[in-house]
Structure formats: structure tokens, C-alpha cells
Image (spheres, coloured by chain):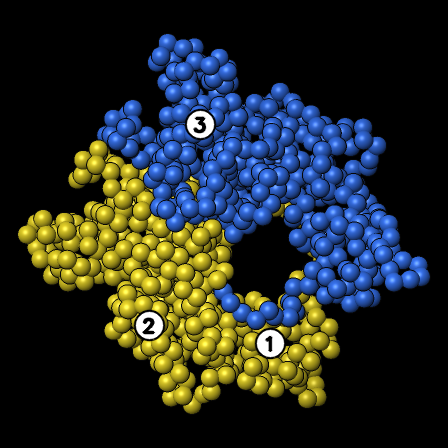
Chain colours: A yellow, B blue
Amino acid sequence: MSSKSPVCFTQKVDVLELLRDGRARTRAELVAESGLSRSTVGARVDALLGHGLVVVAGEASSSGGRPPARVVFNPTARLVVAVDVGATHVTVALTDLSGLVVDVVTLDLAVAAGPDVVLGAILREARRMVAAAGRRPAEVVGVGVGVPGPVEHATGRPVSPPIMPGWDGFDVPAAVQRVFDVPVLVDNDVNLLALAEQHAAWPDVTELVFVKVSTGIGAGILAGGQLQRGASGSAGDLGHLRVPWVPDSPRPADDPRDLEAVASGPAIAERLRGLGLEARTSADVVALVRGGDQRVHAAVRQAGRDLGAVLSGVVNLLNPSVIVVGGSISRASEHLIAGVREVVYGQSIPLATHDLRIVRSRTDHTAGVLGAALLVTRQVFAEDPLPHLIRSG
Amino acid sequence: MSSKSPVCFTQKVDVLELLRDGRARTRAELVAESGLSRSTVGARVDALLGHGLVVVAGEASSSGGRPPARVVFNPTARLVVAVDVGATHVTVALTDLSGLVVDVVTLDLAVAAGPDVVLGAILREARRMVAAAGRRPAEVVGVGVGVPGPVEHATGRPVSPPIMPGWDGFDVPAAVQRVFDVPVLVDNDVNLLALAEQHAAWPDVTELVFVKVSTGIGAGILAGGQLQRGASGSAGDLGHLRVPWVPDSPRPADDPRDLEAVASGPAIAERLRGLGLEARTSADVVALVRGGDQRVHAAVRQAGRDLGAVLSGVVNLLNPSVIVVGGSISRASEHLIAGVREVVYGQSIPLATHDLRIVRSRTDHTAGVLGAALLVTRQVFAEDPLPHLIRSG
């Protein structure tokens, strides 16, 4: 696209949106950067100061007289409840408005216990944490929840989630809002990992695919800078893609398999059992990887090749600039990503791989709650934030 | 997502953006709908009236006295040059601001003649058309160009396009701007078909994949309502995806092929030659389809199945709500889409196919220039439109 630089008319930038980057600014700088009038900026800054959302930061240099005050965003002024519901564990965190964790706890609790039990436990923990931090429930501006299944994003209801009995169509926001009457955002857990990875490691990348290899295999797709959820929330279901056959494959060509059936933790474990090793779960595979057995490394590498065969198609189709491979097996072994790289760089079209980076995840086990917190703060700040933020004012 | 409805603060809607839907409104209605002040709306409407971009439409009902004037968008006030560069033909159109064609011509001109020859001919035609319409060159607000290859969207330069010798990295906007000094937007031709199809047939759909089956096979992906071009402009390269083997396939399992090698016009022609029929090109295949030979229908249906095997993966990955199949072979025969439906509905995950519609294209051979015009108007109206629109004022 080539055009003259236009005068911004329709999209003025809010003062708080500007200050979120953490840089201190004078009111004059805010007027210049926002395009808003001096009086609007003044009223806005006064309101934000009154609510503690910005604080006076220090003094800017000036040509003389009393230097003008600079204000800076105060992310600790409000709280977010960020939740990562896994198959067998639930992590509940309290974060500030930048996603920084104030308190966090992981519960041994299966998602299969159902929404009443799981959400009940989550809400008890969240209330306890708010009190323990010496804060008030009204300081919570939003709740973000990641779940291990597809979610209808507009309503926050899980949609036919295979490993979440009792959750299909359950109105998660309504249940949470009985305790915290704030925006409640629910999303697939891998989407939240993609969001967290981008935020922590690739802030300038708009085309990113995050792949989680664990008990299942799923992807979170960022395209055009936006999480892509598809029409019914099932986008990124990499595990059900057919693995294309390649000439040196260990499987017969006329026995095509879905990716999850050959490259997930349980699938690798099955292959290892065939070699006489004791393995059932992803955790067993990780333990064997740490033992250093060459046969284990070879099995993990072949899983990486199979993943690469599927990702070659994803690269041709979506042309991402970064593919991040995460999940427990990727964390334990470099052989998974080595297999992915071998096949993707060998099979995808040159234009799509020219600047493609295939990397391991740089985030840790707290990425799920970071993603949940980001989901909330992006939503709250994308709308007019004040009505959400000043409830406790 | 669940939240209280927030007061819109950061994103006011411009008057012209509102009026683009073609509905007439009073100034009071514009104040209410835009969130802008009465004086801002008044000044804006006066400016738009002065430039002919809106006109007085008639009279609204009122509680008495002189009824307030209603204004309506006047799409004929300005022009767009919309160009569709194909492998062997170039279509140049002059449209109004709604994409309606004022004049159009198709030239026998191969893209392989190179950018100087092709763009030279395009610019001559465009200037001739503007004059023939009794308009001035300054009334042209933008130029949209579709080309048969990947394009770096930010710069409008083709990137390693396989069938466009001489165009790699060529600065198309700069060449066009020597004649029309306006925004010039360049995109892959299939992306523009996707845009045109959505505009004409699926205006409320945000997740749409348009597939063109012709000499090559490519896709335009709309996700989250936005065209997805990927990191280097090569997103949608469906033709280089591997066709997953299925048990009733006519090909051996250990001879995997790319989609373009089995389902494009030339690939279908090759299969028909194997049956003793005379066919080389997509046009030959279309002619044979019209002849009604059952062997031809069967070959086209198998191409549809192969396309479906690839699209099954696309459905799992992107979860679109609409897949549109276009291109000359789809237009000529229902058997292509029948094959696609057979495989996609059989192989994709139920959640992703539950509400999926797989349909034939409803647009015709002018879709390329319509898409090029839409690319321009969306860009021009997304920014502050007045500086672009009032050049001729």
C-alpha cells in the first residue's frame, strides 16, 4: 500500500491507551500524541489520577519555571483474576493490569469434575487471594479463563469439548459473574498460550502459530495480529489434521493417521512401549527423554517430523513468520523441534520459509494465566476502560 | 465475552463512514449515531456537500415546521481505477466509490510481457476511460491492482511470483503514481476474488475461504473479517499443499502429490488425455465438460475429492463458516463441488462442519475488478477519507 499520510480523524487514541506502554508523559505530550483537545486530556488525566490509575511520575525538563508534571500508568491500581483450567490441574492467579502475577495457586482438580465444582473452587481461591492481598473484590476489573477445549468466544461457552464432560454450552461468564460482576472472557487454553508467547517473546510479530504438544496437539493462530478462533471456536485443531506420507516414513503409506495419533505424548509413549519401554503418558515420555536413551530421542524426533509434515501445509496456507513449539515434550527435548525444522524447511514453498523462524516456547508453566490476564486487559482497554476500571472509585 | 456495554470513547465513527451504507440521514441522526458533536457533524456535512460526496436526499418526517434535510452518500462523486491482471488477459475498469463499473475493457496482454508494457497499457486505458466518461483524472481517488502472484502488501511489490517474469520486487505503486498520484493498492488476484465474493454474496460472514481452481489453485482467506496475507504475502497457497491419501484414491498411496498436480485444469486435462481425449488447458476441460461425457464428469469429481481432502485440513485448522469454490472449472461443472462436499463433510471434525457451507462462486468474471475497487475504497474510507477524496475539490 502506498498513500499520503492522512490526518487521523476517526480514531483518536485515548490517554490511558497511550500511557499503558509505561512511559511517563506530560499533559502537553498527551495532547500531541492523542489528538484530543487540551481540556479533554486535562479532564481525563484528572479522572485517572483520582482513581489511582495514573500517578505523578516525576518532572520533565522545561525551559524555565515550575517543570510540568509527568504522569505514568499505575498497573497495580486494579486486579485481574486469571485462570488456566487444565485436564487435571487448575491454576488460579491474581495479576495486576500488566499481567504481573500477585498471587498464584495450582489445584489438583480435574476439569471432568464439571463446571460447578471447578468454578466453585476457582472462585473460592480468587476471593481468598484478593483478601490475602489486602485488596477489595471491587478492584477486580475482569476474569479470564482458559479451558482445554473449543469455546464460542462471543458467549464464553465451551462448545462440544471432548475432555470436559458437563461443560458443553455451560455459561461460564454467568457463573463467574455471580461472584465477580465484571467482564469474563473464556478461551481455548492454547489460544491463551499463543497470546502469552507473543506478548513475552514476539511483541512485534503479527503472524504467529503456537503449537502445544502434550496429551493432545493443538495450535493457537495469530494472523493479522489477532487470535483466530474460527466460526465456532474450533480453529487451530491441528491434532485432527492428516499427516502427509513422506518416503522415509516409518508407517505404511496406505495407513494415513491424524497428527494426534502419531505425535502426541500418548502416541510417542505407545511407540516406546513397542520398544519394550514403560510409558503411558506425556510425563512418562519426558522422564524417559531425561534418561538419555537414544531410542527415545529417535521416537521424539520422528514425532517432530510428523508434526513438521502437517506444519509444512500450515506454513504454505498461512505464511506465518514465527512457529513456536511448546508443551511438556518440547520443553524436555530438542529433538522434537529438530524434526519439525527438518521437514518444514525441506517441504514448504521457499517464499513462505524464507524468513520463517521455528522456535521453542520461551514461556513457562505460568503462560496460561498470563494469556488469560492479557485477554482481559486487552478487552478492557480496547473499550472505553473507565467504566470498567472505576467501579471501586 | 460478556461485559456491560461501554460508552464509546476512543472510536468515534465518521459521518462519511456512516453514510456509506447508502441510507439517508438527518444531521440529528448523524449526531446520534456518530457520537460526534453537533458542530462537528455540521461542519463535516457542509464540507461533504461542498465536494459533492453527499447530496440532499429528500425530507424526513418531522413534528412540524420545515422538515430537516436528509443527506445521502453520492458514490458517483469520485472514481476508482480497478485492474485485474491475469496470466494472458488484463481487465481495466473505472468504477464509482461503491464498486459499480462505469467502463471496462479486457486486453489480450500477457503478464509475462513485463511490468513496463503491462502497466503502460493499463494506464493508457485508464486515462482514456476517464476522458471518455467526461471526468477529470483528479477525480480518481485510488488505483487497485490484482496480480497472479504473491504481493508484499505493505509496499505493493510482487514477491517471487512464478508466472510473472520481470515483476519480482517491482514497485507497482510508484509506476502507477507517475500518472495517478493517489493511493495504489496491489494484491494477489485470488485475495481480491475473496473480497468481491464476500461483498457480493456473504456480507455478514467474517470467516470465508475462497478457492480458485483454474490453471493453478489458490485461496483467499478472510479470517476475523480481514484478508490474511501472511508474513510475505504468500498465504492461501493451497496448490502446494500435499493431498492426503484416502483409501479409494485412484493414485497409489506412496506417490503423494501436491494439490495443483492433481486438481488444476491442466492436471485434469492430463487425466483426460490418458482416456484418449484431447485436452491441454482449463478451457479444454470446460469444453469437454459441456460435451457431457461421463468420463469427464468423473475426472472433475475426482479433482473435487482431492481438493476436498486438502480443504478438510483447512476446515479443521481455520474453522471457516463458508468455503466458496470458483474458477472456470467450478463454473462449468457441479461435479467439482460435489467431490469437495463429499470429502470435507466426511473427513473434517463435526464441530467445524456443523454450520459450514460449501458453495460455488456467485460472482462472475468481473469479480477481480470489483475486488480491486473494494480494496481501494476500504483503504480510503478506513483512513480519514477527506484528504483523499477532495483533491479535485
- Is B219 displayed left or right of A236 in the figure? right
Both marks 1 and 2 on one chain: yes
Q: Is residue A150 above or below residue B309?
A: below
Q: How many other residues sit within 10 Å of disc 1, few (<14), some (14-19) or many (≥20)?
A: some
How far apart, in angstroms, are the residues tagged by discs 1 and 2? 31 Å
Residue found at x 42% / y 90%: A134
- Is B94 displayed left or right of A21 in the figure? right
Q: Quadrant of residue B295?
A: top left
Mark 2 vs mark 3, foreground winner is: 2
Residue found at x 61% / y 86%: A50
How far apart, in angstroms, are the residues tagged by discs 2 and 3? 48 Å
Residue found at x 31% / y 61%: A164
Both marks 1 and 3 on one chain: no
* Residue B228 drawn at (x, y percent): 50, 46
Residue tagged 3 = B336
Q: How many other residues sit within 10 Å of disc 2, few (<14), some (14-19) or many (≥20)?
A: some
Badge 3 marks a residue whose secondary structure is helix
Badge 2 marks a residue whose secondary structure is helix
- Is A178 displayed left or right of A12 in the figure? left
Task: Specify the farthest residue to the left.
Answer: A276
Q: Looking at the image, is mark 1 or mark 2 earlier in the sequence? A: 2
Instruction: Judge by depth and name the residue closer to the eye, B242 or A144.
Output: A144
How far apart, in angstroms, are the residues tagged by discs 1 and 3? 54 Å
Badge 1 marks a residue whose secondary structure is helix
Q: Is residue A343 visible?
A: no
Residue tagged 2 = A118
* Residue A123 drawn at (x, y percent): 38, 78
